[in-house]
């Protein structure tokens, strides 16, 4: 299968470690926050970071390590994200493009994703909205499967019995996160848009998808906040998809990444998700470093070793 450097509608991966090494025995592993921003373009991110519009990404890039990724063609999200989660080529995942016709399921995934390995190793994990996590796997921790936000958003009762979450009863505790589909006013507020753009936003072909995914991502992010804040897992993986569908519906045409970065809707979506992920990062460090002196610097993640020649 041919491969190409990721350019448009790419995935952005953020792997953040906590600061347990500053306050706990060295034998205890640091907590990890594994964030996925589906559809993020490296070019758009670079342009907007240079203009100081994405402070979360800018800080992580400055204090940590970053690099361009490669992807597969065709760019099918369940394959790409689980290639990252397992470290395996999508050709070895046990799922195929033909499976799209009957729907991807987590039971199709053959290699073990990193959270299963961590769970079997005795670590507490939390996995939220990752592709191919339904039916929710029995892990040492919590799973909000990729179908759970759909249930909370528009609940067909027959799905309630299909293990949308793990533990099963967690779905009942998440009832309070249920929310209506976002309207034009909520999109305008979230993306910082001019209210005069309402008619333009509503008329776009992708309006309905943005309405739905903005609401679902808020469910996912709030559930992640509650888990991190109440009992920080050793490994937390969170995936949000609203940026991807926003670009599908509002990416300027014609226009390249420079035009997209200047687009009110697309640029507003980048700023919104940078802000929301920044809230999770801040809470993650606050939860793990709360007993440190206030001026103690947070450790930057080490870059991965160079691949062998």
Image (cartoon, rainbow, N blue to C red):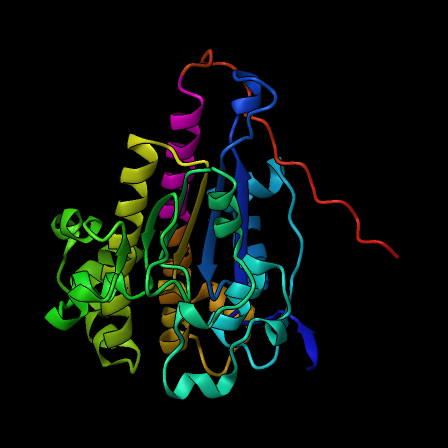
Q: Residue at x 29, y 83 (%)?
A: 205
Decide which of 86, 214 is in the foreground and name it. 86
Q: Residue at x 39, y 88 (%)?
A: 101
Tell me where residue 59 appears, x and y as whole percent.
54, 38
Tell me where residue 91 appears, x and y as whole percent.
62, 76
Left or right, residue 257 beside residue 179: right
Name the residue furthest top: 293
| Residue range of the region highlighted in magenta in the rendering | 274-290
Q: Is residue 153 magenta?
A: no
Q: Vertical placement of 305 versus 63: above or below?
A: below
Q: Vertical placement of 103 versus 127: above or below?
A: below
Residue 271: tell me if it is visible: no
Residue 154: tell me if it is visible: yes
Q: Residue at x 61, y 32 (%)?
A: 300
Tell me where residue 49 appears, x and y as whole percent.
54, 50
The C terminus lies in quadrant:
bottom right
Tell me where residue 213 appears, x and y as whole percent.
28, 65
Image quadrant in which you'd find residue 70: bottom right
Image quadrant in which you'd find residue 288: top left
The N terminus lies in quadrant:
bottom right
Marker count (numbered): 0
């Amino acid at each position: 299968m041919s491969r190409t450097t990721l350019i448009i509608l790419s995935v952005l991966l953020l792997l953040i470690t906590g600061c347990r090494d500053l306050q706990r025995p060295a034998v205890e592993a640091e907590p990890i926050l594994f964030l996925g921003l589906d559809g993020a373009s490296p070019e758009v991110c670079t342009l907007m970071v240079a203009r100081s519009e994405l402070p979360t990404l800018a800080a992580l890039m400055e204090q940590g390590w970053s690099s361009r990724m490669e992807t597969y063609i065709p760019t099918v999200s369940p394959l790409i994200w689980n290639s990252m989660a397992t470290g395996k080529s999508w050709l070895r995942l046990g799922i195929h493009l033909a499976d799209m016709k009957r729907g991807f399921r987590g039971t199709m995934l053959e290699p073990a994703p990193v959270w299963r390995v961590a769970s079997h190793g005795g670590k507490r994990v939390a996995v939220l909205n990752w592709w191919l996590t339904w039916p929710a796997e029995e892990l040492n921790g919590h799973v909000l499967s990729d179908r759970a936000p759909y249930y909370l958003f528009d609940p067909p009762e027959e799905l309630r019995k299909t293990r949308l979450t793990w533990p099963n009863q967690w779905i009942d505790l998440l009832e309070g996160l249920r929310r209506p589909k976002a309207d034009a006013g909520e999109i305008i507020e979230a993306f910082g848009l001019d209210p005069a753009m309402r008619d333009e936003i509503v008329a776009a072909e992708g309006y309905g998808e943005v309405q739905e995914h903005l609401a679902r991502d808020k469910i996912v992010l709030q559930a992640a906040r509650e888990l991190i804040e109440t009992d920080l897992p050793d490994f937390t993986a969170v995936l949000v998809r609203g940026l991807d569908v926003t670009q599908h519906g509002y990416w300027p045409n014609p226009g390249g990444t420079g035009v997209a970065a200047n687009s009110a809707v697309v640029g507003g979506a980048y700023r919104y998700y940078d802000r929301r992920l920044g809230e999770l990062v801040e809470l993650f460090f606050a939860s793990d470093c709360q007993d440190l002196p206030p001026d103690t610097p947070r450790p930057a993640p080490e870059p991965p070793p160079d691949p062998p020649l």
